[in-house]
Image (cartoon, grey):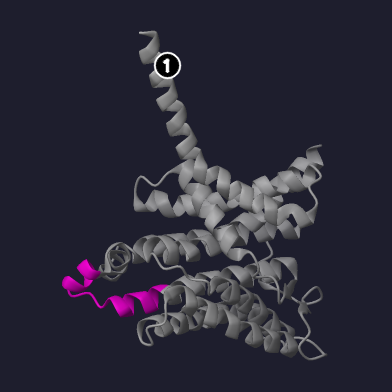
Amino acid sequence: MLDTLRFIITDSLNLGFAYGLLALGIFISYRLLDFADLTAEGSFTLGGAFTAALIFNGINPILSTFLSIFVGFIAGIITGLLHTKLKIPSLLSGIITMTALFSINMILMGIGKDSKYDSVVYLSKLDTIYELFSVFKLRYLNIILLNFIIVSLVTLFCYWLFGTEFGMSLRATGMNQKMARAQGINTSLMIIIGLGISNALISLSAALVAQANQSADVNMGIGTLVVGLASIIIGEAIFGKRNFCNWIISVVLGSVLYYLIIDIAINLGLDSYLLKLLYAIIIIIVLTAPLIKKRIITLKRKKKNVEN
């Protein structure tokens, strides 16, 4: 029982912090920019595949991890350019980039394998960023510690960035583009850079996940949008969004709670093929909880008025 509890806690912290960066990335596009960006599923796999391919070919894991941020940024920039310069609808822009990235990811997988265009790159016998920053004897503790440090630094960076003039302009663009343009803000530039930052964080998240799992899979990005949105919704519902600092911390903590729920469900015997169904149910419950609560309060008031 204790071993199971320890596994649930450590695994939820391990994945929760790593996927917290994914949640932050999706938070920037969906919440701050109000942009329905589907690039995430492609840029997530891109970050994992690119990092794994570099490490497989002898590149330093730290450099490989930093470069994953750059390629994710480029993916977001492309989506932003398609939308702002070519006037392609936001949803379709993300789909186009995501589709193109599938082929690019397959090429990267081929670079990281002896046989070209394989769907998995294994890093089990290679040093990753977690082996280079080894503080504890147990690998999973090193993963939790380093992921916590990285997500804390990124969260602090986001808090600083979105408090600057640039960050406020980006947030204003997401709130009301017409009003932002009237104030002299270049909304097209804000969307392009905002999507770049969003996908850079998503790609970094994948780089950490790939190194923690010691493998990258061409399908690892499937469902990432659901994971990120669920983390955001759970975090907002439980921890609130009283101010911007509280808001972004809630997003990361929501990711940890999300994986805690998933780990508990798996240890209770839920089959892996039912996980996607569980993802959907969690989102439905969290989204409808405020409405149900409001209706319960209304019914109680009506009942009280009738009794009086």
Q: Amino acid at mark 1?
A: Lys
Quick check: can you spot residue 60?
Answer: no
Q: Residue at x 58, y 68 (%)?
A: 205
Q: Nearer the viewer, residue 202 or 86?
A: 86
Q: Is residue 161 left or right of residue 280?
A: left
User: Residue 108, position in %: x, y?
Assistant: 68, 87
Magenta extent: 178-194
Coordinates of residue 65 in the picture (x, y in percent)? 59, 76
Q: Residue furthest left?
A: 183
User: Few, some or many C-alpha atoms within 10 Å of disc 1 (few <14, some 14-19, many ≥20)?
Assistant: few
Who is closer to the viewer here, 221 or 134? 221
Quarter of the figure with residue 179: bottom left
The residue labelled by disc 1 is 303
Residue placed at 59% from the left, 85% from the top?
Answer: 100
**Front one among 99 and 221:** 99
Q: Residue at left 57%, top 53%?
A: 255
Q: Residue furthest top?
A: 308
In the image, residue 226 sits, relative to residue 128, either above or below, namely above
| Quarter of the rendering containing residue 124 | bottom right
SS at badge 1:
helix
